[in-house]
Image (tube, rainbow, N blue to C red):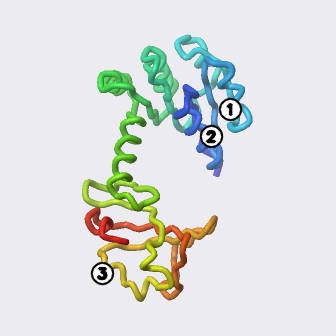
């Protein structure tokens, strides 16, 4: 199976992170920005890096984006450039276009020109930081719904040297431990009879109220 291919327009912090992450996950990535320094910075971490002004309609044919599996419009400080990139990505036949928006009105226009998904990274990160502060003891949280989350949590001291079977977390806490991370090793089928140790990270799923009770 051939690698999936993506074009990322805009190499600010968000665009850079997306482009590099896609490349590290085995995708072919074309990174585009009008800032030569940003293009040079990312050149070794993606398949191709090109300096181009996305407002110029003539650049899209030369970029050859028509066969890409997806496009990421990571431009929010220049709304005209963002909209132009979205329009040309769809006109080129790219089946999936994800676009970053700065405001709700910006998002509305992006939807009208064909963007398939709109994201507000700053808003999403703000909500995630707030949730981590509320939950406090968790390394990271991932909201699954309004009432359920998946969390990465350090093994509570009260659980040291105890096994999942002893603790019976499903019965006593109403949550499920779906994986155990120990350094770089992740066990997605944790041994219920193996004692837990300080420093391990548990990937746990459950009702938010039940998760808050742990520890």
Asked which quadrant contains residue 22, the reply is top right
Left or right? Give the position of 150 relative to 20: left
Asked which quadrant contains residue 20, the reply is top right
Left or right? Give the position of 54 relative to 127: right
Left or right? Give the position of 202 relative to 11: left
Q: Which residue is mark 1?
A: 42
For residue 20, the mark is 2
> Of the residues under marks 1 and 2, which one precedes in the sequence?
2
Q: In the rendering, at what x and y percent does residue 1 appear? A: 64, 52
- Residues packed near mark 1 inside 10 Å, few (<14), some (14 to 19) or many (20 plus): many
Task: Kindly report the distance in space between the C-alpha atoms of the residues bearing marks 2 and 3.
Answer: 42 Å
Q: In the rendering, at what x and y percent does residue 104 appear? A: 30, 26
Is 130 drawn above or below residue 30 in the view shown?
A: below
> Going by the picture, which residue comes out furthest to the front?
157
Residue at the spot 52% in from the left edge and 13% down from the top edge? 55
Residue at the spot 55% in from the left edge and 32% down from the top edge? 13
Task: Kindly report the distance in space between the C-alpha atoms of the residues bearing marks 1 and 2.
Answer: 8 Å
Q: Secondary structure at mark 2?
A: helix
Q: Secondary structure at mark 3?
A: helix
Residue at the spot 29% in from the left edge and 75% down from the top edge? 174
Contact between labelled residues 2 and 1, with CB atoms less than 8 Å apart: yes
Task: Kindly report the distance in space between the C-alpha atoms of the residues bearing marks 3 and 1.
Answer: 49 Å
Residue situated in front as seen by the camera: 2 or 45: 45
Q: Which residue is mark 3?
A: 172
> Of the residues under marks 2 and 3, which one precedes in the sequence?
2
């Amino acid at each position: 199976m051939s690698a999936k291919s993506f074009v990322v327009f805009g190499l600010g912090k968000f665009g850079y992170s997306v482009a590099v992450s896609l490349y590290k996950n085995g995708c072919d990535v074309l990174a585009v920005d009008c800032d030569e320094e940003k293009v040079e910075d990312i050149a070794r971490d993606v398949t191709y890096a090109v300096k181009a002004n996305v407002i110029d309609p003539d650049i899209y044919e030369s970029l050859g984006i028509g066969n890409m599996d997806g496009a990421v419009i990571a431009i929010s400080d220049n709304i005209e450039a963002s909209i132009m990139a979205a329009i040309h990505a769809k006109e080129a036949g790219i089946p999936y276009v994800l676009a970053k928006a700065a405001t709700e009105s910006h998002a509305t226009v992006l939807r009208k020109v064909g963007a398939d998904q709109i994201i507000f990274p700053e808003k999403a990160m703000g909500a995630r930081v707030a949730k981590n502060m509320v939950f406090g003891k968790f390394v990271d949280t991932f909201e699954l719904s309004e009432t359920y989350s998946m969390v990465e949590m350090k093994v509570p001291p009260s659980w040291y040297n105890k096994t999942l079977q002893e603790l019976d977390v499903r019965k006593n806490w109403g949550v499920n431990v779906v994986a155990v991370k120990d350094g770089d090793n992740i066990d997605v089928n944790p041994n219920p009879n193996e004692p837990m140790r300080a420093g391990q990270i548990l990937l746990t799923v459950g009702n938010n109220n039940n998760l808050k009770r742990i520890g």
